[in-house]
Image (spheres, rainbow, N blue to C red):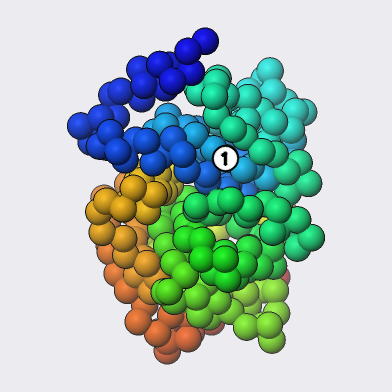
Amino acid sequence: MDTDGFARDAFSRNLGLISEEGQEKLLRSRVAVAGAGGVGGLHLLTLARLGIGNFTVADFDTFDVVNISRQFGALVSTLGKPKAGVLADMVRDINPSADVRLFHEGVTPENMDSFLEGADLFIDGIDFFSLDVRRLVFRRCREKGIPALTSAPLGFGATLQIFTPDGMTFDDYFGFSDRMTRLEQIAAFAAGLAPRPYHIRYLDLSRVNLQKQTGPAVAPACTLAASLVATEAVKLLTGRGTVRPAPCYLQFDMMRGKFHLGMLRFGGRGPIQILKRKLILRKALAAMEE
């Protein structure tokens, strides 16, 4: 196969919205994605169709039947198969010349430097509740000068936070400290992801189980999250457009028709965010008692 010719034809419809020079930059770029599930898998597929040519993918899990509702790599034919391997095959089926490195053990403190080696951008697709490794990888990205993105599917909407090496840190934005309990950290993360929690109005909190670390999620929210991340990835990798890093944030809620581009000037340590965190923690503890 003429790989150069294939890539030129396969991504030709991007041109006009992405310049030829920008498309070449995307083909040369490497994006590290932690997680190949609901959002991580869609991040990979969306970025592959934009013509990004190199990926590093980490995920230790296999597909289960409960993933079918929202994880685009989850099919009857892929049940029981490793998520990272399935998504890597899908990426190569989009672009046969794509270079995909796999970390089937997921991201760990021990392999983090290898996982981020050569990365121009990091994208967070880590499970909501896995806060320790998420904090570590965002901290390491900052040390290495790698921009890092996170987008959470919430209700029928999504959020977007961008962390650049010279902007507000991940821990400062969310107000994390090592003195916090695990529940306090979860509350801080939730409050920072959605400073305006539009989805709470229609969310059935009885379906959120902190012990089992499960909650509702739908495919449209994952698709929206991937669209937000992919657009910012193009900006960061091609140098085109305006990037608004933390303490800025963006929220969409398609069910309620809400959109907000805001800023947490004091991050998670601002008085309003501290109050929100306490309210979320109170609700979480009440739900656990019930």
Which x, y percent locates residue 123? Answer: 52, 52
Q: Residues within 10 Å of mark 1 (few under 14, many from 20)?
A: many
Residue 214 versus residue 63: which sits nearer the camera? 63
Is residue 139 visible to us here? yes
Question: In which quarter of the view is residue 128 placed?
Answer: bottom right
Residue at 50 percent across and 75 percent down: it is 169
Residue at 62 percent across and 34 percent down: it is 100
Q: From the viewer's perspective, is 133 left or right of 98? A: right
Residue at 52 percent across and 46 percent down: it is 31
Mark 1 is on which residue type? Phe
Question: In which quarter of the view is residue 56 placed?
Answer: top right
Which x, y percent locates residue 108? Answer: 75, 58
The image quadrant where one finds the C terminus is: bottom right
Which residue is the extreme one toward the left?
16
Which residue is the extreme one toward the top?
1
Secondary structure at numbered mark 1:
strand
Residue 32 versus residue 154: which sits nearer the camera? 32
Residue 18 versus residue 107: which sits nearer the camera? 18
Residue at 41 percent across and 39 percent down: it is 26
Asked if 89 appears above or below 187 in the picture, the reply is above
Asked if 94 appears above or below 36 in the picture, the reply is above
Which x, y percent locates residue 164? Answer: 44, 67
Which x, y percent locates residue 140? Answer: 62, 67
> For mark 1, what is the residue?
55
